[in-house]
């Protein structure tokens, strides 16, 4: 493998039912930064599906300079084998230096298969990506490579942060956690260069046959999109007592979320969990109520614009990341806060 042949920053533009997933736009935002650091002019989105060309303008508005479209009935719904064939073929043909994939259910299935098929490495579930030297402090006699993709992710149950590089193979591949990277403000009317590519598909016995798609209707709020989150922890005490958080959320037009302890206790569904093994959120305001501030929780909410912590223990680690802290009993403070907000609105 000649590494020099591999150029450019590519992202996998995930779509489901001909609708782009948010992660595609987030990856474009990050890809633009990486491309600038590499003095690359173009960011390329790889769009796979059937009749998906209508999505290319949106990709352009969010930063794609070029979109490689593989359009085929075999790609109508996500299936591991044809998508792997398509994306691996794009890599072999266009030779990207970097390929980013969302760490969604689809991306977690697709990314490792593709990396193995094109014989390169993949760092899963990254929360930070940058261009830099690797290794940072070379041992005597060890070669230091420049302009490598440094892929950072929590490791060992969130107790340490690992930065991983892939200096000897290309592309450098990462799956990236949804909600962590920032989209750019859309450039309305922007157009991308469209490249149609079709490696050909032959239905074979490796292809899964989809008999029926059953969609589960989400009956809980999507906390990743909320602007105000009122998050409760074990300190709330019981599922019934979450009502005081629901009242505060309602007064503010916010959404209730929670820590893992709450999910483990069966008080709230997993979809509402914030943190390393839950969702990464970035609301304007994040209330942490009766939450101690364990590293695994903080990993999912520390990028919130304003963090307000309410905890009876003045030494709780949540106060280290909070912009505003209230020390006291949440059973007194939260209803009083809700009352004052309602009074101010009246
Ligand atoms: P606690 O740590 O028990 O804190 C309760 C807090 O409530 C305390 O600080 C207490 O002072 C306060 N309190 C009690 N009563 C009151 C009151 N009346 N008024 C005010 N304050 C009060 N955790 C997550 O949240 N998200 C994750 O994604 C996650 N992933 C994990 C992954 C791994 C691999 C591991 C090992 C752990 C993970 N955890 C995660 C668990 C994490 O380590 C903590 O155990 C968890 O976050 C604790 O939840 P908590 O803050 O609600 O509970």
Image (tube, rainbow, N blue to C red):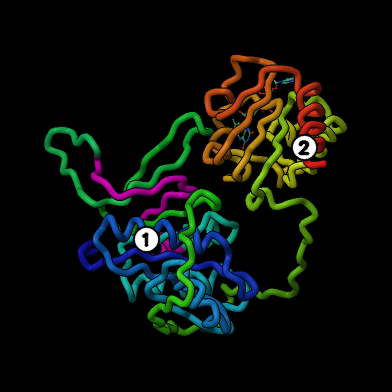
Residue 14 position in % (x across, y down): 54, 67
| Quadrant housing residue 80 | bottom right
Q: Is 112 on the left or on the right of 170, as rendered?
A: right
Disc assigned to residue 32: 1
Stretch of the chain drawn in magenta: 114-135
Q: Do the residues labelled 2 and 1 touch (CB within 8 Å)?
A: no
Q: In which quarter of the image is ligand 1?
A: top right
Inspect the magenta stretch and tell me whether residue 130 lies in it: yes
| Pick the front one: 255 or 42 | 255
The reply to whether residue 290 is visible in this rendering is yes
- Name the residue carrying label 2: 344
Residue found at the far left of this picture: 141
At x 20% / y 48%, what residue is drawn? 145
- Mark 2 or 1: the one toward you: 2
Query: From where the camera sits, is residue 204 visible?
Result: no
Name the residue: 59% across, 25% down: 318
Q: At 24% across and 52% down in the image, what residue appears?
A: 147
Q: Is residue 19 above or below residue 128?
A: below
In x, y percent, where is residue 18? 61, 75
| Above or below 258: residue 170 | below
The quadrant of the image that shows the C terminus is top right
> What residue is shown at x 54% (from left), y 71% (from top)?
81
Is 280 left, or right, of 230 in this rendering?
left
């Amino acid at each position: 493998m000649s590494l020099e042949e591999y150029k450019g920053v590519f992202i996998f533009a995930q779509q489901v039912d001909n609708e782009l997933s948010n992660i595609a736009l987030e990856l474009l935002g990050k890809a633009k930064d990486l491309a600038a650091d590499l003095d690359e002019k173009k960011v390329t989105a790889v769009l796979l599906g059937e009749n998906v060309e209508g999505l290319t303008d949106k990709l352009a508005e969010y930063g794609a300079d070029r979109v490689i479209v593989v359009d085929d009935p075999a790609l109508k719904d996500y299936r591991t084998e044809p998508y792997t064939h398509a994306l691996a073929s794009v890599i072999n043909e266009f030779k990207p230096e970097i390929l980013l994939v969302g760490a969604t259910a689809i991306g977690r299935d697709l990314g490792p298969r593709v990396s193995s098929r094109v014989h390169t490495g993949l760092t899963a579930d990254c929360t930070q990506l940058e261009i830099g030297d690797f290794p940072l402090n070379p041992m005597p006699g060890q070669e230091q490579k420049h302009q490598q993709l440094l892929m950072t992710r929590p490791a060992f149950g969130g107790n340490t942060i690992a930065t991983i590089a892939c200096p000897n193979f290309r592309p450098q591949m990462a799956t990236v956690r949804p909600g962590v990277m920032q989209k750019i403000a859309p450039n309305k009317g922007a157009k991308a260069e469209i490249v149609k590519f079709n490696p050909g598909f032959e239905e074979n016995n490796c292809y899964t046959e989809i008999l029926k798609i059953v969609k589960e209707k989400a009956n809980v709020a999507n906390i990743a999109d909320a602007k105000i989150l009122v998050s409760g922890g074990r300190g709330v005490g019981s599922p019934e007592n979450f009502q005081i958080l629901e009242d505060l959320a309602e007064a503010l037009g916010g959404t209730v979320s929670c820590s893992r302890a709450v999910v483990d206790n069966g008080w709230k569904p997993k979809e509402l969990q914030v943190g390393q093994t839950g969702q990464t959120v970035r609301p304007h305001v994040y209330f942490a109520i009766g939450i101690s501030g364990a590293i695994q929780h903080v990993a999912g909410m520390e990028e919130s614009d304003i963090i307000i912590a309410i905890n009876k223990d003045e030494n709780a680690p949540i106060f280290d990341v909070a912009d505003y802290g209230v020390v006291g009993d949440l059973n007194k403070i939260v209803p009083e806060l809700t009352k004052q907000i309602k009074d101010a609105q009246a």
